[in-house]
Image (tube, helix red, strand yellow):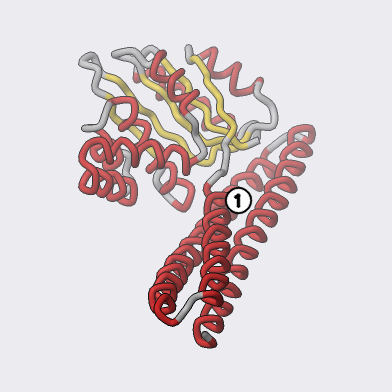
Amino acid sequence: MEKFVAIVFDTEEAAYKGADAMRDLHRNGELAVYAAGIITKDSEGEISVKSSADEGPIGTAFGMLLGAMVGVLAGPVAVASGAAVAGSAAAASAAAGGMAAGGLTGGVFGAYRDLWVSGMDLTILDQVGTELLPGKSCIVASVDEVWTTPLDARMKDAGGTIFRKLRADAVDDELAAEMDAYDRELDDLADELDAADAAAEAAIKEKVATAKAKMKEAGEKISRRADEMDAEFDARLDAIDEQIANANDRMKAKFEKRKAEIVADRDRRAKALDDALKASDAAIVKASSDTALS
């Protein structure tokens, strides 16, 4: 299953050797590595990103994740700088925007949200924060492993301590829930408009217009998310196909099963977003008709 792994090493050199071992596992068809990076804490306690894969849809999102990790582990001042070092312009912009809007606290909140959007919770971050002492380095990677033993064995040989966290995709559910809330709000306003006297109609119609604008904006976010999701799933399936081509027969069967699971997950999530978008369009049309008739 897809998960985040964080492997802490005593030195930066050991972390790079661990990264080489992880690449070997990927090439041998034992582990699908979607994106990876290395963060370090120097002797002064400053955390920085030393290496990051920032290519393609997964790499871009992963750059934002690394920037957010640096920001949370190192404190508010590092949020925007950490994102920039991670190589993601989007991450740096988002972090800087958060600071501009709400000062240092806003930047930290933005970093926590980036972690949540990426599917990483604070449990693994707490574990990394405890283990990543001054002078140590950490590989952070988004991977798909059908067995844990290959990575465990290679990282143990390299001197690494492994932490794992299954990826949790909550952002799609949030978008659908947001759309459902706007839909209910428009229904309530329509009922209120039906019962309103002439003096109250104008104010209610203004509220309807505002709700429609919010729903349209939410629909645009869903459309963007659907495009991002398609690109991310295509990249993941390409990585899984690479594993299928390189794996031995036993591992190949497991990766083929994993590919079918990824395709089913993509179809399910795409349908949920499409259903929410269709509901939005229908609600906006109905609200326009209701206000025109009143």
Left or right of 261 on screen, residue 89 = left
Residue visible at 25% across and 40% down? 80
Residue visible at 44% across and 25% down? 125
Residue visible at 45% across and 35% down? 36
Looking at the picture, tell me which residue is in the foreground, 109 or 149. 109
Looking at the picture, tell me which residue is in the foreground, 200 or 110. 200
Instruction: Answer yes or no: is residue 26 visible.
Output: no
Question: Would you call the spot at circle 1 few (<14 residues within 10 Å), some (14-19), or many (20 or more)?
Answer: some
- Label 1 residue SS: helix
Above or below, comparing residue 234 to residue 92 in the picture: below
- Residue bearing mark 1: 238
Above or below, comparing residue 1 to residue 229 in the picture: above
User: Where is residue 234, by image quadrant?
Assistant: bottom right
Residue 207 in the image, given as x and y percentages of width and height:
42, 70
For badge 1, the amino acid type reads: Asp
Residue 130 in the image, given as x and y percentages of width and height:
40, 14
Instruction: Answer yes or no: is residue 33 visible.
Output: yes
**For the N terminus, which image quadrant?**
top right
Above or below, comparing residue 139 to residue 220 in the picture: above
